[in-house]
């Protein structure tokens, strides 16, 4: 019972710490991680079109709040556009990933090269 | 023994037991020497009984690492690329230009129902390795438990979902605890100012 109480208190404290404090985050996360979860664990729930629409909305919202998108966001969006055959938009998003995060250059150049393949 | 001496002895014993109880700070010598800018997170190895644990966890790992200041490769895109191009995990870092690779093993990931409560447990270990030299930069083993009271006739929710919801807070501590977690990365304002 004592250990149960301890864990409960620790948990309440932890949740308070995580939810209550308004620690400023570096990025605006939107649905990026939620989509990774749903597209891998329950793949039938959302079409690529719906995923693109949701991420584009996240991006507009973040821009309005002057916040940065997290690492991987533009690459993910670019990959979805690529799956839909919308190659210009795919290219634009991949370039955005590289501009925001030069660490992604090798990955992005590889993806861009595969877009050029017939 | 005088009362004063007894107090002194007791105080010493207390101080010692407190010190012994704390974990030693991690030795960050290798980490500082090869300080990575980017992290490639490979799909975790799943030793738990939860079938979807690996992707459940993988969808919670980007945020704490990125908020710690690192570039985190897009986990879903990388997975597709590795499958489509038949890239082995050992080659992936080189092909993607990653500075470091994070290997995670999920030891426990789910809920065990007890008499009056349900205990959700996320237990994991991780190793961060320098991609070029193969030097171990950081490793840690960590567990977090969340008990929920079922009450009378309480219904246990989905075990995977409970673990999934705990994975986020688990990662914040796993990577962020001072003296045990990762040093701050280059996109964090406190980069290079770690003790």
Image (cartoon, grey):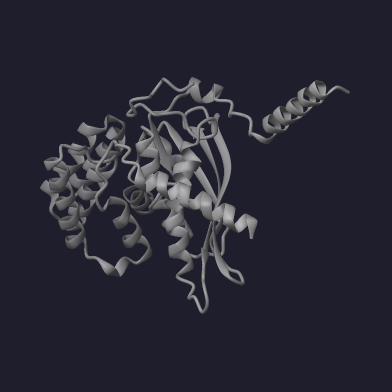
Which residue is farthest bottom?
B153
**From the viewer's perspective, is A21 left or right of B152?**
left
Residue for point 56% across, 36% down:
B139
Q: Quadrant of residue A72?
A: top left
**From the viewer's perspective, is B162 left or right of A44?**
right
**From the viewer's perspective, is B107 left or right of B195?**
right
Query: Looking at the picture, does residue B121 appear above or below residue A24?
Result: below
Residue for point 63% across, 34% down:
B23
In percent of width and height, residue B187 lies at: 32, 29
Residue for point 79% across, 25% down:
B9
In percent of width and height, residue B114 lies at: 61, 69
Q: How many marks?
A: 0
Near-viewer residue (B84 or B76): B76
Query: Looking at the picture, does residue A39 appear above or below residue B68?
Result: below
Residue for point 58% across, 29% down:
B26
In percent of width and height, residue A84 lies at: 17, 58
Mark yes or no: residue B5 visible. Answer: yes
Mark yes or no: residue B61 visible. Answer: no
Near-viewer residue (B73 or B170): B170
In percent of width and height, residue A64 lies at: 11, 42
Q: Quadrant of the N terminus of chain B?
A: top right
**From the viewer's perspective, is B108 left or right of B84?**
right
Which residue is farthest right?
B1
Which residue is farthest front?
B3
Q: Quadrant of residue B37?
A: top left
Query: Looking at the picture, does residue B89 appear above or below residue B32?
Result: below
């Amino acid at each position: 019972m004592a250990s149960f109480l301890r864990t409960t208190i620790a948990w309440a404290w932890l949740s308070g710490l995580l939810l209550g404090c308004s620690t400023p985050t570096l990025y605006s996360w939107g649905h990026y991680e939620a989509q990774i979860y749903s597209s891998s664990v329950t793949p039938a729930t959302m079409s690529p079109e719906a995923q693109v629409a949701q991420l584009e909305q996240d991006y507009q919202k973040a821009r309005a709040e002057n916040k940065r998108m997290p690492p991987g966001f533009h690459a993910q969006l670019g990959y979805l556009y690529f799956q839909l055959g919308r190659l210009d938009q795919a290219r634009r998003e991949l370039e955005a990933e590289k501009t925001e995060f030069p660490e992604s250059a090798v990955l992005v150049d590889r993806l861009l090269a595969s877009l050029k393949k017939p | 023994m005088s009362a004063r001496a007894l107090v002194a002895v007791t105080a010493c014993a207390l101080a010692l037991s407190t010190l012994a109880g704390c974990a030693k700070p991690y030795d960050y010598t290798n980490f500082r020497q090869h300080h990575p800018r980017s992290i490639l997170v490979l799909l975790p190895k799943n030793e738990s009984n939860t079938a979807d644990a690996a992707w459940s966890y993988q969808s919670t790992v980007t945020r704490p690492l990125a908020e710690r200041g690192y570039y985190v490769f897009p986990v879903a895109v990388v997975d597709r690329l590795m499958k489509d191009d038949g890239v082995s995990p050992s080659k992936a870092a080189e092909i993607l230009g990653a500075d470091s690779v994070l290997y995670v093993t999920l030891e426990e990931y789910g809920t065990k129902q007890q008499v009056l409560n349900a205990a959700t447990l996320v237990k994991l270990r991780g190793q961060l390795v320098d991609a070029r030299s193969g030097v171990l930069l950081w490793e840690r083993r960590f567990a977090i438990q969340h008990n929920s009271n079922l009450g009378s006739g309480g219904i246990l929710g989905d075990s995977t979902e409970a673990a999934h919801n705990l994975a986020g807070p688990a990662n914040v501590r796993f990577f962020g605890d001072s003296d045990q977690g990762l040093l701050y990365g280059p996109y964090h304002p406190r980069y290079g100012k770690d003790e």
